Image (spheres, rainbow, N blue to C red):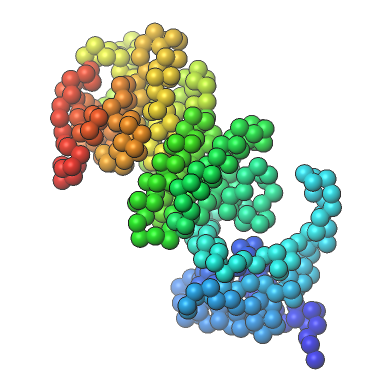
Amino acid sequence: MKVTINKIIQSLSKADAESLYSIYQHRCLNRQQLKKLHFDTMYPNNEVLSNRNAKKNIKALLKFELIKEISYRPDESVFFLTTTGIEVLRQIYSFPANIYDEQKKTSVRGYFRASELEILPRNINHQVHLNNFVIDFMSNKGDIPIKYADEKFMNTYTRIRPDGLFSFGDVDVFLEMDMATEKKSQLYEKWEQYRNFINSNEYFYRERKIVVLFIVAGTHLLENRIDLVRYTIYETLLDLHDGDFEIVVGTHEILQDYLLKHLVPSFKNDIEYKQDIIQTLKDKHQYVWSEAIKLNKIFKNAKFDGYVRKLNEENKIYIENNRIQEFLVDDYYFSPTDVIAKIAYIQKYNLTFKERYNRNFSYLIICESELSILKDLKSLDLTAQPNVFYTTLERLKSLPFHEAIFQFDQFGNVFHFENNGLTKQVFEAALGNLDNF
């Protein structure tokens, strides 16, 4: 005799119910993902118990036919909910039968059927990688309240549909999982959709900053793929950057690092890296940092991280070697696409600044290394830009200011300066001679 829904519910543990709900939220999960979500945290120092209880959990869900296992590659499979699994979830978590859809002005079902959550076998690997990224981040984010929605459950935006969405603080983080299957023309189509979104009323009236994380996987030529994706972004979207929209392209590891070292700390107002830069500029080079709130008001569609200046005894900006010692500052690691956009339109910013203050605009970009920004600059022929200077935290800590600051020429050669006038360049290294960096 078939077991009734009530009997099944009575037989399930709390972990069983939570596992079902996680599969619902993520559309599908594999064994390792279920284990990491519900049992590694339950038994953080006991791998044996974690494995044992994960197997027991999956066995119970399969026994009652609440989930089904689908293979999508040799020796790789995931679990989807069955119709019975959905019905059990509905009763445990009191899913409403119907809800009112404000956008469609109609009543819609308050839950997804099992068939609506299923994914074609050829797309399962994409979902597994997306779920890995989400689970890794949620496992390491600490105590910050973060909401996640898979594309299937997303209702915040209607003009754009990323693969997933994190919301916390004043930021919405769009997740785009790339398995290196889209052709160049398809990438252009994707960014055209984003361009239409940025030009829409929905974007204009939004209340939150948007950061798009484009997660690259599925190829052994990761750097080549990342370069291609960035190039298509720069070709399509640079002119629309407004300081409240950013796209960061990288691998799973790079973007996890970006989230955990930048976005989460910025929400907590505790970015050690930025504080290290500010303190180094002050202690070693006598440059005072301030937020660029007043200056940002004169630039339309641009926001700079900070404004640094060296002051004399009368508290006025110091002139050294015939140069006013001030810079607007950004960090390339934290806002790569936004920085490239500003470099591309540097003359526009210089004109605005000069009209207001009767002097040239100086832009200082902080990079991880001399080479970290060079590919992007060369791809758009932006290497030799007047009024644009670069440095790294390591250089700021170890070198005099005029040596810590550098520029590229059109061939990608690196030059620092003879003094703080930043006019007479001193050759440092050639692009091809990587040992010199």
Considering only vertical position in the picture, is 299 above or below 223?
A: above
Quadrant for the N terminus, please: bottom right
Q: Residue at x 36, y 34 (%)?
A: 380
127 relative position to 230: left or right: right
* Residue 424 % position (x, y): 18, 20
In front here: 170 or 437?
Answer: 437
161 relative position to 404: left or right: right
Q: In the orientation shown, which residue stands out farthest toward the front?
A: 185
Q: Residue at x 41, y 41 (%)?
A: 231
Quadrant for the C terminus, please: top left
* Residue 157 % position (x, y): 66, 44
The quadrant in which residue 11 appears is bottom right
In front here: 302 or 47?
Answer: 302
* Residue 72 % position (x, y): 53, 73
Q: Residue at x 67, y 85 (%)?
A: 63
Considering only vertical position in the picture, is 293 above or below 146?
A: above
369 relative position to 259: left or right: left
* Residue 329 % position (x, y): 38, 28
